[in-house]
Image (tube, coloured by chain):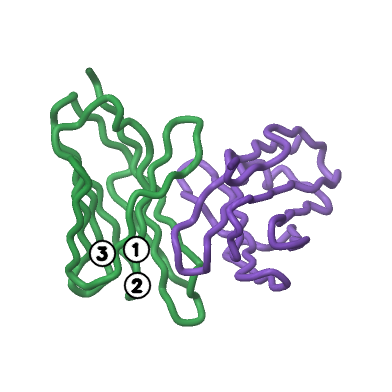
Chain colours: A green, B purple
Amino acid sequence: GQQVMQIPQYQHVQEGEDFTTYCNSSTTLSNIQWYKQRPGGHPVFLIQLVKSGEVKKQKRLTFQFGEAKKNSSLHITATQTTDVGTYFCAGDAGGTSYGKLTFGQGTILTVHP
Amino acid sequence: NAGVTQTPKFQVLKTGQSMTLQCAQDMNHNSMYWYRQDPGMGLRLIYYSASEGTTDKGEVPNGYNVSRLNKREFSLRLESAAPSQTSVYFCASSEVWYYTQYFGPGTRLTVL
């Protein structure tokens, strides 16, 4: 079945440093979504990427979808303590799997003030 | 507008006991989902309902059953709980099956 791998599993940064998490799928995706989960909380939608090579920005967050639609990344510039949490990518293979998201294992981000 | 609500928030069961996790959404969404989250495993889809009256298996359906009671409610039943089902369970909904998913606060289940 479809697999979505996410690296790194953990990332510790000093406040103000940049952070990147990478997501790789074993199959071509119709779209990829990113979610953030604060400690003790539930996943909250951040963004959806659909087009090959797509780049979207949300303030200090930059999301990219690979040309082959099999990988994606999330980059945070100048991290803040409010960025703490687990970041998940979730891939939708489309076709008969439409709507059935496969989540990566997540990257746990710790930001030291 | 409460979004997605789940009950109970916490539950402790003994092996072999049964229980039903309840989920309701007030966003008039068509699609609903049940996930489990285990450390280091991300979220894994148990069952989903693309629209009222339909349900389908996800990645890890064994040991679970679901009921889409109406458009608002989607319940998850454990018939005979096992320690391997100790997890955090999240319900989610989306307007249609290819849109953003909105998650509930989760149910933390421990099976002894």
Q: Type of residue at label 1?
A: Ile
- Where does label 1 land, which residue? A32
Residue at the image point whose x is 72% and y is 55% from the top: B73
- Where does label 2 land, which residue? A29
Q: Type of residue at label 2?
A: Leu
Query: x, y percentage for residue B42?
Result: 46, 49
Q: Type of residue at label 3?
A: Asn
Give the letter of the chain under mark 3.
Answer: A
Task: Identify whether B80 is placed above or below B94.
Answer: above
Q: In this view, does A16 lie to the left or right of B66?
A: left
Q: Alpha-carbon distance for marks 2 and 1? A: 7 Å
| Same chain check for tags 2 and 1 | yes
Quadrant of the drawing holding the C terminus of chain B:
top right
Query: x, y percentage for residue B36?
Result: 59, 49
Residue at the image point whose x is 35% and y is 53% from the top: A34
Q: Are marks 2 and 1 in contact (CB under 8 Å)?
A: yes
Q: Alpha-carbon distance for marks 3 and 1? A: 9 Å
Query: x, y percentage for residue B4?
Result: 60, 46
Q: Earlier in the sequence, mark 2 or mark 3?
A: 2
Outermost residue toward the bottom in this view: A95
Q: Is residue B68 left or right of residue A63?
A: right
- Where does label 3 land, which residue? A71
Of residue B78 and residue B31, the one placed in the foreground of this image is: B31
Q: Which of marks 3 and 1 is nearer the N terminus?
A: 1
Outermost residue toward the top in this view: A113
Give the letter of the chain under mark 1.
Answer: A
Give the letter of the chain under mark 2.
Answer: A
Residue at the image point whose x is 18% and y is 24% from the top: A15
